[in-house]
Image: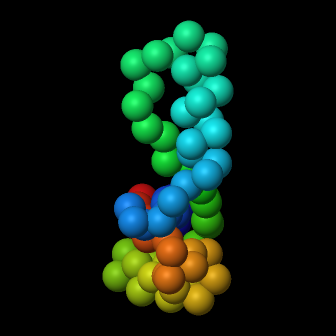
Amino acid sequence: MKATVYVTLKEEVLDPQGDAVRRALRALGFEDVEGVRVGKLIEIELSAEDTAQARDELSQMCAKLLANPVIEDFRFEVG
């Protein structure tokens, strides 16, 4: 079973990398870009018995390692 995890900074956390990307895009002529937030995408192969078990394991993985719950949000898709 394949899962995709998306980790992003919480809205209230400043994103200096996203700001640098926004400035670079505007410098390249993409003046309509008003904001950029940078995150990470993680693909995981699971051998879970069912989707419910996979979701539970993914939630634990994100909370314990893949995301910093103080400054990051996460979501995942199982399929």
- Which residue of the protein is positioned furthest toward the top in this rendering? 29
Where's residue 24, x and y in %? 64, 27
Taking depth in this image into account, of 58 and 24 the one nearest to the observer is 24
Residue 70 in view (yes/no): yes
What residue is drawn where x is 38% and y is 62%? 11
What count of labels does the image hold?
0
Q: Is 36 rendered above or below residue 66?
A: above
- The colour style of the image is rainbow
Q: Is 17 rendered above or below residue 13?
A: above
Where's residue 12, x and y in %? 39, 66
Query: Residue 55 sits in which quadrant?
Result: bottom left
Residue 50 in view (yes/no): no
In which quadrant is the C terminus drawn? bottom left
Query: Residue 51 sits in which quadrant?
Result: bottom left
What residue is drawn where x is 40% and y is 31%? 34
Where's residue 47, x and y in %? 58, 76
